[in-house]
Structure formats: C-alpha cells, structure tokens
Amino acid sequence: MTVAEQSRPGTSADAVDGVTPRFVAEPASGAACAAVLAAASATRQATVLRGGGTKIEWARPVDVIDLVVSTAGLSDLLVHRDGDLTATVGSGVPLSRLNTTLAARGQWLPVDSAFAATTVGGMLATNDSGPLRHRFGTPRDLLIGITLALADGRLVKAGGTVVKNVAGYDLGKLVTGSYGALAAIVDATFKLLPLPHASATLRAVYTDPSALAADARALASGQFEPLAFDVRAAAAPDGPRWTLFVRFASSPASVPAQLDAARTLLHGEITALREGIETRAWADQVALPWNGDGAVLRWSWLPARLPEVLAFVTALGDGCEAVFTGRVVTGAGLVRLTGPDAAVAAALARARVPASPVGHVVVLRASRALRAQVDVWGAAPSAPAIALKRALDPAGILNAGRGPI
C-alpha cells in the first residue's frame, strides 16, 4: 500500500513547527505503523513521528514535511504486572494517565515532565526528565523492554518483561533520546516503584550563590538519601535569588529524621514544605523554565563546578534575563533566556566556548528564526551514530532532517 492509502491529507491543525504535512497517518497497531514507515521509505517521504506534540518543535526548522505519523492510536495500557512491579504500555499513552492508573495499585513510574500531555513515546524519544532524576535516573534507566517499528517495515522487540532480563540487544537505550530519528516506538516496558508513604522538602533561599554551593556540597557528601535535590536561580524584585530544594520521601519515621539532620547543614532562609504546598513547589520547579516566553537551553556540567555554573548564569543576564533550574548531583538542567534573538544567540555562543563551565548545550525551545540562525544540537553526530542512522533508516526519512542524527 502507498502512503496515501494509509493516511489522510494534512491540515493546518496538523502543522509541525509551522509546516503543514502532506499526509497524516494514525496507525492503530505496531504492524500498521511499520507498514506506513515502509511505504514512506519506498518513496522517500520526509517523516515526523508525533505523540502528544508537546516537544514537536525541539528540532532544527525545515520547510517540507511529507508525512506525520501519530501514535494516538497506540494508547492502551497493555499489561500491568503489579506483583512484579513492571508495566507494558503503548507509546501513545499520556504519562499522567499511566501514573493515575498505576497509583490505584500503590505504584508509579517516577518520571516528572513539565508537559501534561506528554506521551510515553515522546518521553522516551526525548529522554525527558526532571527532579526525580536524582534518585531514579532518566526514562532510559527505567526502561526494560521495547517494541519498535523500523523504517523497512519490520516490527522488532528487545528486552523483556522482568527487571532482570538479558534478552536481545539494548535497542531501548539506543532509541531513547533519539528524537524519532531511528525508529518509531510502539510500546515500552518499564520497571515501576512503590509510591512513598511520606514526603517532605526543605527549601533554602540564598542571596549569595557561593553559600548555596557550599551547603549543596555538604548535603551531597552527607549520609542522606533524597528523592530530589535541585537548585534554582531567578530574579526577584529586590535582586537575584538562589534556591536549594531537597526532598525526602520514605517511611513516616525516616522522613522527619532526615529533614532535621539536613536542616542543620543549611544556612539560607529555610522553609519546610509538606503535603499540598510541597507538591505545588515541585510542580513549579519543573514548569519554571517553560513558563512565559524565551528560549530554553538544556546543558550539563560537572557537579563539582556548581559554583562556576551559578556565576555563569548570573553573567548570562547581559542583554537577556536568565532563569535556571537543575539537578545538583547529576549536573543537568535547563536555562530560560528571555530577550532579543541576538542577545540569546550571544549567550548561547558563550555557553559553548571551551572555557565555559557547562557542556552539551542544546537549544530545545526558541523562535523559528533563531533556530534557523544557530546550531540547535551543538556537536555534530559521531561516526557510530551516523552508521546507526544509515542502518536503521537507510532512506533517511525519519525526523525529516530535523536532527539530531
């Protein structure tokens, strides 16, 4: 069958980054998804995979998109093995709906996203994560099995349905973070965690970033097991403020003890957050980089260089306002830069010089004009990455040349 026979004409409502696709396919099974991709490869149709569309503009801009393949039809929770703490779920299932379902059994997939409509497939394709990364890692670390539709029409599986499995090549880790450039995710199997019985957070606000960095170092080297350990830098009416968040979630007896011990190491303006106030504080921390206008960059750093990173964020305010959130121990975070495109481009250039304290700088959100002027992805793909792209997508149709491979 041709692409036209398996799809419908695209409309302005289907536009990707301002470009209306010629066709839109909405396969309801993995086999149908593979058949669509095979037809697209045969005629070299520039193809974009779409889940909830929350991160669809995380890419370099292009002028032509022939086909959008939606995962909306792959939206079933296939199997929840609550006794084994695993679940297999269709790639089109929203993360929020998955966790609501799992919570009825006292379990969760510990991934926090800023986007309410993000799907399991989109979460994996971008390796989206937030503060929970401190304890649980990224989606790549929670994935134990996957089904993929390849560009040549094959449907392949890797991994398994139990935590300790060694079945097949680790294709799940390969496609996680590939932005849909290697294959379409049909379904995924995850290891789950029990929901914690108690939780509380210490928030410490500082006027001196070096004091925050010293306290963060003291906490990181102590005998603590936080669920999340985050930093924020943002402007306030009376000057910049730096905030440290440390969250403990465990048994009702353990949480107060860790909270009290951690409090003795902090020197900022300290507040203990519990229940609804705590939930709102962390939701705000996750959403902060995306609130309002401005470009959003993702970068990483060596955790020992946190003092330099905080100073660097302050210096980025030259011509644009910077808001920064990040994971203290894992050295990963987001910065929102609000200002003219020229000022944002200059800040991006400063972040990418070899002497910068940050690395792996990627432009996630920005105006189409700015993304056309700068290198969105930074470093060019490696030779092995290019070889994998050619092996899995020989016609080069997937992600329509938008990157990163």
Image (cartoon, helix red, strand yellow):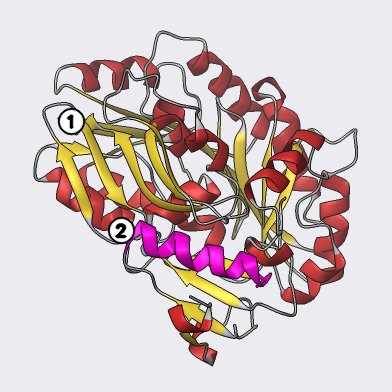
375 left or right, relative to 220 = right
Q: Residue at x 22, y 21 (%)?
A: 256
The image position of residue 194, as x and y in percent, is 19, 30
Relative to residue 20, is residue 101 drawn left or right? left
Disc 2 from disc 1: Cα separation: 28 Å
Q: Is residue 63 above or below residue 284?
A: below
Residue 318, labelled with which disc?
none
Where residue 32 sits: x, y (%)? 39, 65
Q: Main secondary structure of the magenta part?
A: helix
Which type of secondary structure does the marked residue at label 1 adopt? strand
Write the residue at 35% across / 60% down. 92
**In this image, 135 relative to 64: left or right?**
left
In percent of width and height, residue 162 lies at 26, 25
Give the quadrant of residue 174.
top right
Pick whichever, 402 or 36, lies toward us: 36
Which amino acid type is shown beneath numbered disc 1? Ala
Local packing at callout 2 (Cα closer than 10 Å; few below 14, some 14-19, many 20+) is many
Labels 2 and 1: the sequence-earlier one:
2
What residue is shown with label 1? Answer: 198
Residue type pointed to by label 2: Val
The numbered mark at residue 93 is 2
How crowded pointer 1 is (Cα within 10 Å; few <14, some 14-19, many 20+) is rated as some
Give the number of callouts: 2
Q: Residue at x 85, y 62 (%)?
A: 374
* Residue depicted at x 18% and y 44%: 79
Q: Which residues are magenta?
A: 29-46
Indicate left or right for 198 with 225 as reference: left
Q: Is residue 166 above or below residue 189?
A: above
Is residue 24 among what the camera can see? yes
